[in-house]
């Protein structure tokens, strides 16, 4: 029975979609589905979507079982110690946790780190692109060029070198944020 239940709910875990087929509406464990929705941090709106899908087939959603499973799943999702990791991984937070202030503080700390890492990746890619362009310009400068062409390439090189320096400076600042020391005088 448990294997059958797992086989019935497994496609929902993979798909993460909220519309159900007639067979799924008739055979799903509403508790397990609610648990998965809670564990993944989905909003309660998922239940409405299930109700809409299943009503098309004349199937009534066991709302109480879904709510019971959802509450248990949220207990796992909303552990503040895991919030930081969710933020660092770039996961979206839908404001579903009852201990929202505690969770949100940790999530935002992780999310800021995620955004810094994303920015650094973007800057590193841009720096790589600029370095490739500089290499191509250096090779062209060794060719037989007119004075005007040579000056044009030198101008492009200076511009790209400045751009690369700005990027290096920003990368340095992101890697070495200023340390803030707070004093509390009473």
Image (spheres, rainbow, N blue to C red):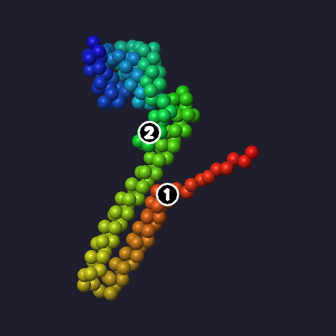
Counting from the top left corner in percent of width and height, residue 5 is at 29, 17
Q: Say if residue 27 shows up in the picture.
A: yes
Residue at 31% across / 75% down in the picture?
137
Can you give x and y, in whole percent of width and height, for residue 70 in the image?
44, 22
User: In the figure, 117 relative to 106: above or below?
Assistant: below
Q: Quadrant of residue 37?
A: top left
The residue closer to the viewer here, 162 or 147, is 162
Q: Residue at x 43, y 64 (%)?
A: 168
Decide if residue 12 is on the left or right side of residue 40.
left
Q: Residue at x 31, y 30 (%)?
A: 14
Q: Label 1 crowding class (10 Å Cα cut-off): few <14, some 14-19, many 20+?
A: few
Q: Is residue 22 visible?
A: no
Q: Residue furthest left?
A: 144
Query: Is 160 left, or right, of 99 in this rendering?
Result: left
Mark 2 Cα shell of 10 Å, populated few (<14), some (14-19), many (≥20): some
* Local SS, label 2: helix
Marking on residue 85: 2
SS at mark 1 in the image: loop
**Residues marked 1 and 2 touching at CB (< 8 Å):** no
Q: Locate residue 65, reporting x and y percent.
A: 42, 15
Q: Front-most of 30 and 184?
A: 184
Tell me the tag on residue 163: none
Q: Which sits earlier in the primary sequence, circle 1 or circle 2?
A: 2
| Residue at x-position 51% and y-position 43% | 109
Q: Position of residue 161 (x, y in %)?
A: 40, 72
Which residue is the site of mark 1?
176
- Residue 134, compared with residue 1, is above or below; it is below
Q: Quadrant of residue 102?
A: top right
Q: How far separated are the C-alphas under marks 1 and 2?
A: 21 Å
């Amino acid at each position: 029975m448990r294997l059958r239940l797992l086989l019935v709910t497994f496609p929902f875990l993979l798909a993460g979609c909220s519309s159900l087929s007639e067979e799924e509406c008739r055979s799903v464990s509403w508790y397990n589905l609610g648990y998965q929705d809670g564990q993944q941090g989905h909003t309660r709106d998922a239940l409405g979507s299930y109700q809409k899908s299943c009503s098309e087939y004349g199937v009534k959603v066991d709302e109480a079982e879904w709510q019971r499973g959802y509450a248990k799943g949220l207990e796992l999702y909303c552990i503040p110690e895991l919030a930081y990791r969710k933020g660092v991984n770039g996961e979206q937070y839908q404001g579903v946790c009852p201990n929202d202030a505690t969770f949100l503080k940790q999530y935002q700390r992780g999310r800021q780190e995620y955004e810094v890492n994303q920015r650094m990746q973007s800057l590193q890619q841009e720096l790589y692109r600029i370095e490739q362009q500089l290499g191509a310009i250096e090779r062209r400068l060794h060719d037989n060029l007119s004075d005007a062409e040579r000056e044009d390439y030198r101008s492009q090189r200076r511009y790209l070198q400045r751009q690369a320096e700005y990027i290096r400076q920003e990368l340095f600042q992101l890697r070495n944020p200023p340390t803030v020391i707070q004093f509390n005088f009473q």
